[in-house]
Image: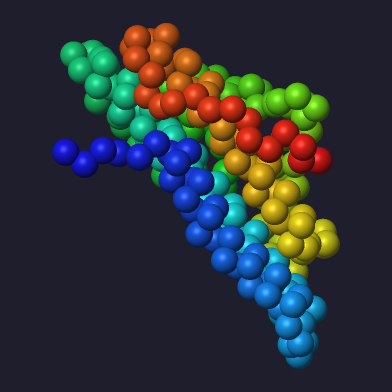
Amino acid sequence: MKLKRAPLHVFDKRLKSISAVQRIAEDIDRLEVSSADLKKHYLHQSYIIYLVASWQIFIEYLASDCFDEIMSFRDTWPFRDKLKSDFDKARKRFNTPNTGNIDALIEAATGKKKIIDKCKWPNFSNEKVKNRLSQILSIRHEVAHKTKSVKRLSTDINWNHAKFLYNCACVLNNVLTDYIKEITGTSPFVTVEIKYKDIC
């Protein structure tokens, strides 16, 4: 039997894969390349597109796996078809991974309300988490629809955004693991430590 990988693990692999875009920008810094700043500018912007897409896929996988876990525990529940229909509709509406849409999708999948309110760690308040996530999505929107971000981007700034989203993914993973364990008695995923505690 092929074991299914946890959404957090898949997200981590995606982040490592798209880091190739960042590495190209670093290579340009080490070489004499014509129009180096312009090329790095577009690389930095394209990385944000990949990063937010990876974040969105993580949220979708997380919600789907949690939904499946709960439904497998309630295999004789009379409302299963209605819950599945409601969750399918929520997935179709999930086209931007912002705080409100994440809350709505996770609630449709698990019944857990306002999960983004749980997103915080030492020296990084929930308000700061919400503001940073909104900022990253705003940058993605500007790049995708205006081909230019008002916010300055760099290799270091992009690494920081990636670390921030990975921390958020760890928190969501842990909160939902504990929540589903309370319902089913089993842990769907392994809880993890916040990896990047020094990001600003």
Quarter of the image where the N terminus is located: top left
Of 14 and 127, which appears nearest the observer? Answer: 14
Q: Is residue 146 visible?
A: no
Q: Is residue 193 left or right of residue 3?
A: right
Question: Residue 86 at x, y = what percent?
Answer: 37, 30
Q: Is residue 128 left or right of residue 133?
A: right
Question: Residue 124 at x, y = what percent?
Answer: 77, 29
Does 12 sit above or below residue 148? Answer: above
Tally the numbered discs.
Answer: 0
Residue in the picture at 71% in, 56% down:
158
Residue in the picture at 65% in, 59% down:
48
Q: Is residue 24 visible?
A: yes
Seen from this angle, which residue lies furthest front? 30
Q: Is residue 70 left or right of residue 57?
A: left
Quarter of the image where the C terminus is located: top right
Question: To which quarter of the image does residue 181 belong?
Answer: top left
Question: Residue 65 at x, y = what percent?
Answer: 36, 32
Residue in the picture at 77% in, 37% down:
198
Of 75 and 120, which appears nearest the observer? Answer: 120
Does 193 sit above or below residue 40? Answer: above
Question: Residue 89 at x, y = what percent?
Answer: 39, 37
Of 198 and 104, which appears nearest the observer? Answer: 198
Does 26 sit above or below residue 165? Answer: below
Question: To which quarter of the image does residue 32 belong?
Answer: bottom right
